Amino acid sequence: MKTSFLGRQDYVPLWRAMQQFTNERDESTPDEIWFCEHPPVFTLGLNAAKEHLLAPGDIPVVQIDRGGQVTFHGPGILMVYPLIDIRRANIGVRKLVTALEQSVVDLAAEYGVEAASRADAPGVYVGGNKLASVGLRIRRGASFHGMALNIDADLEPFTRINPCGYTELEMIDLHRLGIKLQLEESSNKLLPHLLRHLGLSQ
């Protein structure tokens, strides 16, 4: 398993790089996890309803090939992109989603914050507020796209959409919960939990 912290990356080139990695990998290609953040961008999943995009303003909107509805990515939001051959690893899609969610639950618990996933809506929540969003694509037996974890973000752009298709859903980040991690530091803290839940090693 190779892991990379890529810093701030423009969304579309990195998305294309994930697609290319997935298209070109074979049975011997090592799995990778990419961590990064993006400049402000709204992304719409394959079946996203445009009415959930309320008032994007000057923030770009990109239609992409993951599941899920509309969400926002921006500085201070940690992107976790697991590029994993799930057939080879014998990991079902549900286990991958659960591993992503549970890694955030475990990270929050380290700091005394109770977070939880929900059966009816992917992601991680603290009270009624959403801390992390999950949207995956599986192609050729391998995963790409992944999870967005709010670390220390401007949450105002989320008010310009119905996040993940839910009206009046409010977002939260780690800093507002009193967990003062920086972006790369949070990726380092999250990784061991994620690998443990996936049953993979670094």
Image (cartoon, rainbow, N blue to C red):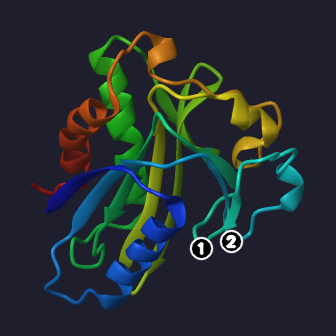
Q: Indicate left or right for 23 with 160 as reference.
A: left
Residue count near mark 2 (Cα–Cα under 10 Å), binned few <14, some 14–19, many ≥20 = some
Nearer to me, 87 or 169: 169
Q: Which of the marked residues, 1 or 2, is nearer the chain's N terminus?
A: 2
**Looking at the image, is 22 positioned above or below residue 57?**
below
**Looking at the image, is 153 positioned above or below residue 59?**
above
Residue type highlighted by circle 2: Leu
What residue is shown at x 83% (from left), y 37% (from top)? 167
* Residue identified by numbered label 2: 46
- Residue 100 lies, in percent from the top left, at 38, 47
What residue is shown at x 42% (from left), y 42% (from top)? 101
Q: Indicate left or right for 110 with 124 as reference.
A: left
Residue count near mark 1 (Cα–Cα under 10 Å), binned few <14, some 14–19, many ≥20 = some
C-alpha separation, residue under disc 1 versus residue under disc 2? 5 Å
Secondary structure under the numbered disc 1 in the rendered image = loop
- Residue 6 lies, in percent from the top left, at 29, 53
Task: Classify the position of the C terminus by image quarter.
Answer: bottom left
* Residue identified by numbered label 1: 65
Task: Classify the position of the N terminus by image quarter.
Answer: bottom left
What residue is shown at x 23% (from left), y 65% (from top)? 32
Q: Are marks 1 and 2 in contact (CB under 8 Å)?
A: yes
> Image quarter for residue 60?
bottom right
Residue type highlighted by circle 1: Asp
- Residue 150 lies, in percent from the top left, at 49, 33
> Image quarter for residue 158?
top right
What residue is shown at x 49% (from left), y 58% (from top)? 10
- Residue 177 lies, in percent from the top left, at 48, 13
